[in-house]
Image (cartoon, rainbow, N blue to C red):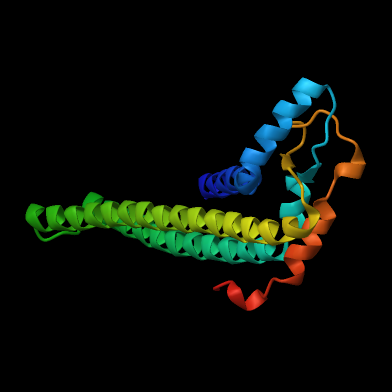
């Protein structure tokens, strides 16, 4: 299950970083022209802001609710697999006990029981693989939902703000230093939460 947590965090971190690259698609041409003019004239007229991704993910109610749902699903999967694994272990021990004490009427009967336990083990491994893939697929869909949600909001938000460039910042991955005056993280969080309806998250 730790693997699925890693997958979840990885998808969301990647998806969120991509959000802010994609949100500026409508301004790419203008930004490029502005940047060219800036380099030529030696001055900048670009309007730039940045968003702290870690804070956004921590405070965005939509993501928090999604995360809680996924944690519950992961716990349900873990419980199901643990119960089946305990039953399989008990059956295997019982088979070993009976086999060592000549508890089977014939070698053929012992072989049948052994094959049954092997089949249970294969079925459990297949179920674990299936549930893990389903969880990873849902995590990926959640990442896309997160990206679409933020992209949709930023398009509306930027109609009034008119930023040429909105940069994502995760720790020191992108920005080594930025003037806090350019930090619009809380504005984005407030706007996203204001239009979020908890009923949109399926449990």
The reply, left or right, for residue 140 in relation to residue 30 is: left
The reply, left or right, for residue 41 in relation to residue 17 is: right
At x 23% / y 51%, what residue is drawn?
118
At x 44% / y 64%, what residue is drawn?
80
* Vertical placement of residue 196 versus 93, above or below: below
Q: Nearer the viewer, residue 145 or 90?
A: 145
Q: Quadrant of the C terminus?
A: bottom right
Report how many numbered discs are placed on residues in the image: 0
Spot occupied by residue 44 in the image (x, y as percentages of width and height):
83, 31
Q: Report the residue that reaches farthest toward the bottom.
A: 199
Spot occupied by residue 46 in the image (x, y as percentages of width and height):
79, 37
Q: Nearer the viewer, residue 46 or 82?
A: 46
Among the 4 quarters of the image, the one containing residue 180: top right
Residue 25 in sight: yes
Q: Nearer the viewer, residue 116 or 202?
A: 202
Q: Nearer the viewer, residue 203 or 147?
A: 147
Residue 102 in sight: no
Among the 4 quarters of the image, the one containing residue 196: bottom right
Spot occupied by residue 112 in the image (x, y as percentages of width and height):
13, 57
The reply, left or right, for residue 141 in relation to residue 169 is: left
Spot occupied by residue 22 in the image (x, y as percentages of width and height):
60, 46
* Vertical placement of residue 140 versus 70, above or below: above
Among the 4 quarters of the image, the one containing residue 37: top right
The reply, left or right, for residue 68 in relation to residue 186 is: left
């Amino acid at each position: 299950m730790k693997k699925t947590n890693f997958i979840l965090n990885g998808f969301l971190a990647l998806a969120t970083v991509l959000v802010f690259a994609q949100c500026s698609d409508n301004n790419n041409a203008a930004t490029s022209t502005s940047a060219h003019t800036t380099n030529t004239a030696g001055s900048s007229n670009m309007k730039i802001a940045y968003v702290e991704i870690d804070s956004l993910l921590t405070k965005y109610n939509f993501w928090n609710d999604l995360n809680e749902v996924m944690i519950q699903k992961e716990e349900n999967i873990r419980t199901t697999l643990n119960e089946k694994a305990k039953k399989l272990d008990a059956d295997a021990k019982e088979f070993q006990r009976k086999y060592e004490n000549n508890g089977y009427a014939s070698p053929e009967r012992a072989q049948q029981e052994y094959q049954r336990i092997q089949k249970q083990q294969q079925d459990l491994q297949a179920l674990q693989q299936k549930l893990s893939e389903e969880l990873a697929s849902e995590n990926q869909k959640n990442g896309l939902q997160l990206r679409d949600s933020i992209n949709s909001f930023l398009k509306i938000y930027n109609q009034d703000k008119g930023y040429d460039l909105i940069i994502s910042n995760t720790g020191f991955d992108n920005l080594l230093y930025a003037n806090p005056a350019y930090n619009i993280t809380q504005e984005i969080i407030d706007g996203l939460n204001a239009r979020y309806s908890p009923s949109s998250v399926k449990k």
